[in-house]
Image (cartoon, rainbow, N blue to C red):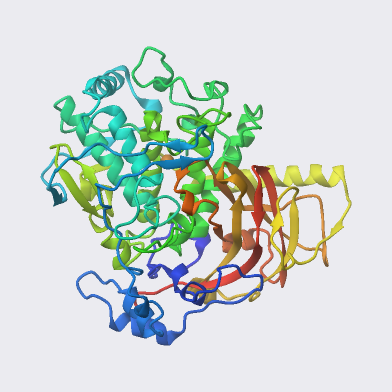
Amino acid sequence: MSLSHFYTTPISSSITSNNPLRSTSTKTTSSPSVHLSNRTHYISCEQNKQTNKESNANHNVIDRRNVLLGLGGLYGATGSAIGAPFTPPDLTKCHKATDDDVNPKEVDCCPPDYGKAKMVDFTPPSVNDPLRVRKAAHKYNPDDIAKFEAAIAKMKALPADHPWNYYQQATIHCTYCNGAFDQLNTKNLLQIHESWFFLPWHRYYVYFWEKILGKLIGDDTFAIPFWNWDTPKGMYMPPMYLNEKSPLFDDTRDKRHYTSVIDYKYTYKNSNPTDIDAVVTTNLAELDSIFKETLQLPALFMGKALRAGEKPTPAPGRCESLHNVAHMWAGPPDKPHWNMGNFHTAARDTLFFAHHGNVDRMWDIYSKFRGQKVEFRDPDWLDSSFIFYDENEQLVKCKVRNCLTPESLRYSYNPEPLAWTTIRRKYKKLRNEAKKRSEGDSLKLTPVSGFGSQPRPLTEPIRVLVQRPKTSRSKDEKADAVEILVIDGINVVGGSTARFDVYVTKSLEGLVGPDNGELAGSFVQIPKAHQKSSAGKDSSLELGISTLLEEIEADSEKELVVSLIPRNGDVIVSGVRIELFKVDDDEI
Ligand SMILES: [Cu+2]
């Protein structure tokens, strides 16, 4: 399958992944996950055969715990719960969390008091229930706005301790993201961000919020708006959120951005771009890259695996990293970045739900590009569960497998043109002009060498030569394994906000010019509350580069120049490497 044709060609080859990034040997040993050498991680055919034998016929899923045990019982002897689906926490054991951007640092993230409420399994809505259709926020008419405002006003007017109360609802985000609970029977943080739970958890969260609002105004067709930040006219704060008299208004947002276009390269410093057309084009090109580079390996889009008993190692997908930018941009530039700019408080702003409507829509589009093949056939993902308070005031336990499509929850998105699917030619023109300008600035070439063996602070741009495991791969080889740039051991000093961008270009015999090359992706972190014990845990960033290499005609290059460009925050990086990751094929 050619990646460059995926927008127009029906996806026929099997690209479903059983969490392929976990399938490497690196995560099954006790050694640190920092790798300074370049290695190829192919899963052997034997392992694939073994996993298939163990697949569950009903759901076509594979039990990775058996696979791991079969590979030497690495986890079996510990008796821990490692390698199992996530479960809801013990609701009686909520504790304070830490937020490094706040003074004093301790914050309360405990959810509504569920008392002795009995938890039942969530039953997905009937196919006969009305379909709720979410519309783009910037297209809302006065009637749409009035209805939405009425619902929000009612939610805000509920008693403060009611589980449907606006602020109680906002606290749920804090609960699952900010260290209010440990995972059941462990000392490990309950955290659904920066992993494969990011998209399904937020899907449920927004779903129940919408259902409750509908119930409050007695309308079972009620749907929330989505912030359509992937289309030129939607790349602004939707106007209805800026009316100071509206219950949708939030005074904490960055006022510089009330009328400016969102820049996906935003850090707190660069605001209000003047060349709007260039920013919009660059934004769209990034979206195009995100979809193309992640299509074969869902972990690259959705985030890496996290299983019960594991200490979360932040590894967000590109969807989440981009979503962080919009949080940063909407929230204020100063600490503690309330509301949107800090996970701990983000859901206090109604714009959060429009933002996550679009994040959820991105997942839906991604899923449809993939022919709606399940992203991870792993029961540790599918059978993981979260709790929510539903529109009948019932505590429900919701499994990932029941939210794989919006339609299964009886909602959908009003179709909007996907502006980023046709931007490539315009973007190339823009890039070529920029390159010419940069050549004019300086023809100076500077030497580049390897990263070295020690972690390095990213106080200035780091440009390093990185070897590729294989050059000039055939189409079949590319369909079989994805080339990935891995940035290891990313430590944000102080755990606060940070960003750096990663560029790739060809080397000129060990030298590099002034142009950084093409953007491969970004590391973007916004402040969050956490448990002290998990502070400072290193992150990793994994970026697909197959399409990028075709674009810059670097397929035959043995080495590439990778540039890490600091934008914000104090960051230390431990290593940069390029690997090939096997794409699981359910037809094997
Ligand atoms: Cu968010």
- In the picture, measured across the screen, residue 473 lies left or right of residue 446, that is left
Question: In the rendered view, would you say 235 is above or below 459?
Answer: above
Question: In the rendered view, would you say 468 is above or below 91?
Answer: below
Q: Quadrant of the C terminus?
A: bottom left
Q: Residue furthest top?
A: 245
Question: Which residue is more in the foreground, 386 or 199?
Answer: 386
Q: Quadrant of ligand 1?
A: top left
Question: In the rendered view, would you say 361 is above or below 190?
Answer: above
- In the picture, measured across the screen, residue 117 lies left or right of residue 277, that is left
Question: In the rendered view, would you say 366 is above or below 72?
Answer: above
Residue at (17, 26) in percent of width and height = 216
Measured from the top left, where is residue 255 in percent x and y?
Answer: 54, 20
Residue at (30, 63) in percent of width and height = 85
Residue at (73, 51) in percent of width and height = 516
Question: Which residue is more in the foreground, 378 or 278?
Answer: 378
Measured from the top left, where is residue 154 in percent x and y?
Answer: 22, 21
The answer, for residue 7, to whether it is visible in the render is no
Measured from the top left, where is residue 487 in percent x and y?
Answer: 61, 60
- In the picture, measured across the screen, residue 266 lies left or right of residue 377, that is right
Q: Residue furthest bottom?
A: 46
Question: Which residue is more in the foreground, 441 or 119?
Answer: 119
Q: Quadrant of residue 551?
A: bottom right
Residue at (60, 63) in percent of width and height = 485
